[in-house]
């Protein structure tokens, strides 16, 4: 009896520690990401300022700019031409680079990628989820209720 209680306590402590470790890794990744974003913004602002002040006054007779004006140009150009990581259909293109980054992220936070993935995709494509609400409205409730009845009947047979 004492062994079972101590094992249960050890399992709870172990699970609790793993949860905290995962949370700390995620918080660390977020803080690291924010720091990297600030560093990149700073570096790109300086780079734009240096290039502008080197080329534009001599070529086009434009005035010299400050760091904050260069930083504003970076943000403006990103908004104008690139957005902030969003694609026209809301999904990023399936390429090797992003898949590898996703795998590294899942390993970093300690989540098995298999556990995090949908097992079933309707019609072989996530695009078909747009029909789910209408399907559920038309057929889903009745099909689900029939499934529940089947499961309950199987349980009664097993008894």
Image (cartoon, rainbow, N blue to C red):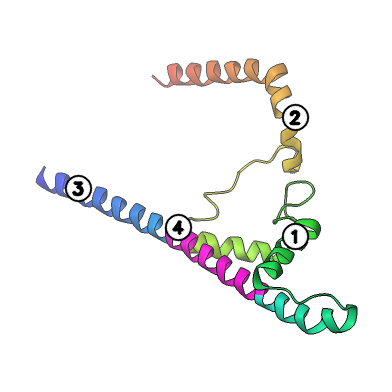
Q: Residue at x 86, y 84 (%)?
A: 58
Residue ID for mark 1: 76
Label for residue 150?
none
Measure how far apart labels 1 and 2 are at the Cα level: 37 Å
Q: Is residue 44 above or below residue 21?
A: below
**Label pair 1/3, CB-CB below 8 angstroms:** no
Measure how far apart labels 2 and 4 are at the Cα level: 34 Å
Say whether disc 1 or disc 3 marks the residue closer to the N-terminus. Answer: 3
Residue extending farthest to the left is 2
Say whether disc 1 or disc 2 marks the residue closer to the N-terminus. Answer: 1
Front of the two marks 1 and 3: 1
| Magenta part of the chain | 26-45
Residue ID for mark 2: 131
Measure how far apart labels 2 and 3 are at the Cα level: 46 Å
**Label pair 2/4, CB-CB below 8 angstroms:** no
Residue ID for mark 3: 9
Q: Is residue 90 above or below residue 83?
A: above
Q: Residue at x 72, y 17 (%)?
A: 138
Label for residue 26?
4
């Amino acid at each position: 009896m004492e062994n079972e209680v101590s094992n249960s306590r050890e399992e709870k402590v172990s699970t609790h520690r793993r949860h905290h470790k995962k949370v700390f890794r995620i918080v660390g990744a977020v803080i690291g990401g924010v720091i990297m974003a600030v560093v990149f913004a700073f570096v790109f602002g300086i780079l734009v300022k240096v290039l502008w002040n080197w080329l534009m006054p001599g070529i086009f007779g434009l005035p010299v700019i400050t760091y904050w004006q260069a930083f504003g140009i970076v943000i403006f150009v990103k908004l104008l031409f690139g957005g902030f990581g969003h694609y026209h259909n809301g999904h990023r293109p399936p390429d090797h680079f992003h898949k590898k980054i996703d795998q590294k992220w899942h390993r970093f936070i300690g989540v098995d990628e298999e556990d995090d993935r949908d097992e079933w995709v309707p019609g072989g494509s996530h695009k078909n989820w747009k029909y789910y609400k209408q399907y559920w409205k038309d057929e889903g409730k009745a099909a689900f209720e029939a499934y529940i009845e089947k499961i309950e009947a199987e349980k009664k047979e097993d008894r």
